[in-house]
Image: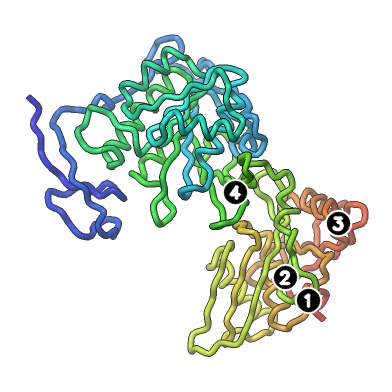
């Protein structure tokens, strides 16, 4: 007979202890311990493996491995295909997380309706009844004959339905509600999430049926459950959006089959999530006119050029330590750029509050917007507006030099399409072809850019 013992497991990091603790010594989370029953028998997931297509589990030469899992098929939603790297890969294991009500279930139900026109799709729900899913599906126009709904939470009962239906892909909503009877702890605990995900991973890889898991997030924005969950899956997607706003950004943070820099932009409407074909136009739609501290810069998200509005506000501080508040940009990077302005630009900002924001809820993490951030800050400090038809591109080094950026021509083409007439760019080492109607202004350092734009 198996021996059992009670342990307390941190639901944030998985740390185990024999006694309850108020604060986890590993991740410093408060009130994160839950009681779980440990058995001495090994879980069926211990040493789990999946059979190769020819039934042989032994080692094989990599050049002899068949590429059955490399095929892709479209989700029917272009923005999601872009984020995934071109579509759903057969046998892939994908996790999508986001705040409650952000649209995770809506997006995947829309995908299920489109893919169901090609073959069977299984939607496993542990949170909604079939009637509730039908109501939402009717609103979204997803009532397809090949779309099957399964209200089940136990892995052992889900697997036979997958083998029977043989769907094109499976949706699990959500992984925190799924459990296995191999361990006695409650659904949603670290042990259950780990073991249930492991069983689903084995089913996914052995059958070649791709799976999408919906994951809840914690108050810190991380996917609830053990961090191991993000390591187990092939792709991790985060759904982001401003509270109360209609726009959503789907961002890839891990992707074994494509770039992690791609984003998909959607707008939430009554009939569901609609694709935004030109995100640059969206982010610049409410840009003010002759106002200081507003600059347009161009960045790359994977293969997509994106124009964003960078806003800066510099005001006198009434405190010994001025405030530095950033949204959508790396605060450490902005701190470096402020030091460059002080040292290389000759402006004294030590007694000023500095606020930097990327409009529209976008997040920029590439150095190609460095020059744009600097010009926005200087424009606000001197209260001199920047010409609305100018786009600013360039990375800035510690000595104040403006360095070249990758893929400058697609950025300029995007700016030309949106009607910009001037582009301040790094001094090129080789000829850069200017789009029709766009004047190129090459600069070699921050001081030269400030003299041209803020005189």
* Numbered disc 4: secondary structure: strand
Q: Nearer the viewer, mark 1 or mark 4?
A: 4
The answer to which of marks 4 and 2 sits earlier in the sequence is 4
* Quadrant where the N terminus is found in the figure: top left
Mark 3–mark 1 contact, CB under 8 Å? no
User: Which coloring applies here?
Assistant: rainbow
Q: CA distance from mark 4 to mark 3?
A: 24 Å
Badge 3 is on which residue?
Answer: 419
The residue under label 4 is 249
Residue 441 in which image quadrant: bottom right
Q: Which residue is mark 2?
A: 294
Tell which residue pokes out farthest to the top in this image. Answer: 54
Horizontal side of 8 relative to 282 (left or right) equals: left
Residue at x 36%, y 22% (from the top left corner): 158
Please give the name of the residue rendered at 51% of the width and 15% of the height, measured from the top-left corner.
64
Mark 3 and mark 1: Cα distance apart in space: 19 Å
């Amino acid at each position: 007979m198996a021996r059992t013992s009670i342990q307390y497991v941190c639901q944030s990091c998985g740390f185990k202890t024999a006694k309850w603790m108020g604060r986890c010594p590993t991740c410093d989370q408060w009130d994160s311990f839950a009681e779980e029953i440990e058995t001495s028998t090994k879980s069926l997931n211990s040493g789990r493996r999946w059979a190769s297509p020819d039934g042989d589990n032994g080692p094989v030469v990599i050049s002899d491995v068949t590429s059955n899992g490399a095929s892709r098929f479209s989700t029917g939603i272009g923005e999601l295909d872009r984020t995934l790297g071109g579509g759903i890969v057969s046998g892939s294991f994908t996790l999508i997380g986001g705040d409650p009500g952000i649209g995770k279930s809506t997006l995947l139900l829309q995908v299920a309706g489109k893919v169901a026109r090609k073959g069977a799709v299984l939607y496993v729900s542990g949170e909604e009844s079939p009637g509730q899913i039908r109501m939402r599906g009717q609103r979204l126009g997803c009532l397809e004959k090949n779309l099957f709904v399964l209200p089940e939470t136990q892995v052992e009962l889900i697997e036979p339905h997958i083998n029977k239906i043989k769907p094109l892909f499976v949706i699990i909503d959500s992984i925190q509600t799924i459990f296995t009877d191999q361990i006695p702890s409650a659904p949603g605990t670290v042990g259950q999430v780990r073991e249930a995900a492991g069983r689903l991973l084995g089913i996914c890889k052995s059958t070649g049926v791709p799976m999408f898991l919906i994951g809840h997030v914690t108050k810190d924005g991380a996917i609830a459950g053990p961090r191991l969950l993000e390591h187990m899956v092939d792709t991790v997607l985060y759904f982001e959006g401003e509270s109360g706003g209609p726009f959503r950004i789907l961002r890839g943070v891990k992707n074994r089959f494509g770039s992690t820099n791609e984003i998909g932009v959607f707008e939430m409407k009554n009939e569901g999530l609609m694709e935004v074909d030109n995100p640059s136009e969206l982010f610049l739609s409410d840009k003010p006119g002759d106002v200081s501290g507003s600059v347009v810069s161009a960045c790359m998200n994977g293969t997509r050029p994106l124009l964003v509005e960078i806003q800066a506000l510099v005001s006198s501080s009434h405190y010994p330590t001025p405030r530095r508040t950033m949204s959508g940009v790396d605060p450490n990077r902005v701190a470096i750029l402020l030091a460059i302005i002080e040292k290389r630009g000759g402006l004294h900002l030590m007694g000023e509050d500095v606020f930097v924001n990327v409009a529209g809820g976008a997040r920029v993490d590439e150095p190609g917007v460095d020059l744009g951030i600097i010009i926005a800050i200087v424009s606000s400090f001197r209260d001199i507006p920047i010409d609305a038809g100018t786009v600013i591109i360039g990375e800035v080094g510690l000595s104040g030099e403006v360095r070249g950026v990758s893929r400058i021509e697609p950025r300029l083409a995007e700016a030309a399409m949106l009607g910009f007439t001037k582009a301040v760019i790094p001094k090129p080492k080789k000829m850069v072809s200017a789009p029709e109607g766009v004047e190129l202004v090459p600069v070699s350092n921050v001081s030269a850019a400030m003299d041209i734009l803020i005189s």
